[in-house]
Image (cartoon, rainbow, N blue to C red):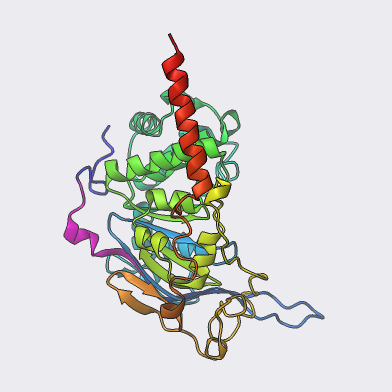
Amino acid sequence: MSLSGPHIMNTGVAESALEKPILESIAVSKHFHSEAGLFQRKKPPVQAVNEVSLAVRRGETLALVGESGSGKSTLGRVLLNLLKPTAGDVIYEGRNLGNLPADKLRQVRRDLQIIFQDPFASLNPRMSVESIIGEPIWLHRDDSRSARQDKVAELLRTVGLAPEHGSRFPHEFSGGQRQRIGIARALASEPRLILGDEPVSALDVSVQAQVVNLLEDLKHQFGLTLLIVAHGLAVIRHMSDRVAVMYLGEIVELAPVNALFETPFHPYTQALMAAVPVSHPDLRRPRPLLGGDMPSPSKPPSGCRFHTRCPHAKPLCREVKPVFETVEPGRQVACHYWREIANAGAGSLIVPTPSAAYSQRLNLFKSHQALSLESQP
């Protein structure tokens, strides 16, 4: 059985196709309303996502990053139509998902799949692995049972598991193996785009690299488009083409991955970079860290939503919402004073020049190592 077909391409993606969005949101908002109790006032809605416009290019890996509560997972689910937007439109290959009838929407479900964060909660413990992976094939394709079993076996081999694992149940696998089963399930319908909702955050560090490398290999093998929601900036830099930084339901900066890590413009992005630990003491330097907590999304601040925690905030920030400004082709930022503060913490992930003391100790170590090698028979 070959996994390549009308929905999966084994060849490289053409450069012109990369510029055409496969999925985009147009001023999308998602608000959650709570029911008022008998003796309680109605609470204001939680503004999880607020007027976000974002285009996902065909064949790229786009990362959504931000603190917990920034709305990145909610945005991902709205883009896949798992949650209905309160306002705005989601366009998939020229079709508005909000206007599609049920039968057309079911066809789109085949193209848009998700890998969930928790590999222990996302798999039905009462179903065998063969049933879990075979269910999307049964829903979207009219295949016989034997053909379905063959496809499940090939999918298991594709994600690094043995075909005989199909008869087992989820509790018999480790966390990393369960996530591979989740990836195989996402591939079963031959999708065009896969959303990874923090696909490695629940795994051990030693297993995270294996899953990230697997996703990268599958992307190139099947011509997939990946939308990755993540906290780990190291993972983002390794596998992403572009990064969208979210804060309190809004995108504050969008840039190619290398440009963002080398020169972050928005003060929130700079603070995220500053929080990344540096291993060696001599390579550390003071970084501005965020103070306070993120405001409640049910009562977001006026003006720039980040001004309550921004060390560069001025009266204008409290009164006027910044425009999402195009700095250069492919790069945008929403900050009134980004030109003035662009270098105030940029390059926090770039290794600085070692101190003289550290260089001296390093040279001394190399000298001792060379002498020890010469003294060996």
- Relative placement, left or right, of 254 versus 128 is left
The spot of residue 92 in percent (x, y) is 32, 65
Residue 280 lies in quadrant:
top right
- Residue range highlighted in magenta: 12-24
Residue 262: x %, y % from top left: 39, 60
The front one of 159 and 122 is 159
Whether residue 161 is visible, yes or no, is: yes
Residue 79 painted magenta = no
In depth, the one of 2 and 209 nearer the eye is 209
- Residue at image x 57%, y 38%? 204
Image location of residue 40, percent across then percent down = 79, 80
Task: Determine whether 180 is above or below 348 in the image.
Answer: above
Position of 159 relative to 251 (above/below): above
Where does the N terminus fall, quadrant-wise?
A: top left
| Observer-nearest of 110 and 72 | 72
Examine the structure image and report whether residue 15 is included in the region drawn in magenta.
Answer: yes
